[in-house]
Amino acid sequence: MRVLLADDHAVLRAGTRRILEDEPDMEVVGEAGDGRAAVDLAQRTRPDIVLLDITMPDMDGIAACQELSRVAPDARILVLTAHDRQAYVRALYRLGAVGYMLKSAAASELVAAIRRVHAGEQVYDAALAADAGQRDAPQATLTNRELAVVREMARGRTNREIAQSLSLSENTIEFHVRNLYAKLGAAARTDAVLTAQRHGWLDSSEPFC
């Protein structure tokens, strides 16, 4: 796995590099101290994973995420930050990030998250799932079809991909997604999946668990 590190703290980048390069299947292909440099490096090095901080000079992680999704669409963006606000999670998810980890995570959790993201999963820090569960309880239990849809959402699949997987029309999937949002009090896919996970509606094998 080719990993690009983007963080304005050189000491943190150095520590992360040491952690990753101890893994036989990981290689750090570049380091950037700001968002603009991360975008430029991603274009040149074509990483598999971009480990992206939010607070950086010149171009912050949110703007960088948007640019990275455009110039390096094959790179999987995993946010690594000290910010635990759900608003950041939702914004970065919409811009193409497939994971969001807090810097308080253990080294083993970070390594595991990188592997899971590289395998096509979405990964979110357990603390964020717990925070999402502090909201009001869902209005109703989910139907079997809604459970199937939210599990596909947890794997990062689009409505079209879910429709193909479940042999349903895309319009039907959109209908189920709207119902999920209403039942779970969710404004976005990340909210829906995190809330379903918190209430025990995703198996332990699901990516968000």
Image (tube, rainbow, N blue to C red):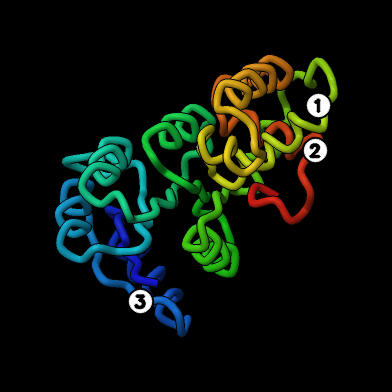
Q: Is residue 197 left or right of residue 157?
A: right
Tell me which label, 2 or 3, sits earlier in the chain. Answer: 3
Crowdedness of circle 1 by 10 Å Cα count: few (<14), some, many (20+)? some
Mark 3 highlights which residue?
A: 27
Disc 1 element: loop
Q: Is residue 159 left or right of residue 182?
A: left
Nearer the camera: disc 3 or disc 1: 1
Tell me which label, 2 or 1, sits earlier in the chain. Answer: 1
Could you say which disc has been placed on residue 142 in the image? 1
Disc 2 element: loop
Q: What amino acid is labelled 2 in the image?
A: Trp
Disc 3 element: strand
Q: CA distance from mark 2 to mark 1?
A: 8 Å
Tell me which label, 3 or 1, sits earlier in the chain. Answer: 3
| CB within 8 Å, label 2 to label 1 | yes
Residue drawn at x 73%, y 38% is: 148
Task: State how many labels appear.
Answer: 3
- The x, y position of residue 90, in whole percent, is 48, 30
162 or 35, which lies in front? 162
72 or 80, which lies in front? 72
Could you say which disc has been placed on residue 201 in the image? 2
* Above-or-below relation of 115 to 184: below
Q: What amino acid is labelled 3 in the image?
A: Glu
| CB within 8 Å, label 3 to label 1 | no
* Above-or-below relation of 130 to 207: above
Residue drawn at x 35%, y 63% is: 48
Q: CA distance from mark 3 to mark 1?
A: 42 Å
Residue drawn at x 35%, y 76% is: 27
- The x, y position of residue 184, in whole percent, is 71, 22
Quadrant location of the N terminus? bottom left
153 or 107, which lies in front? 153
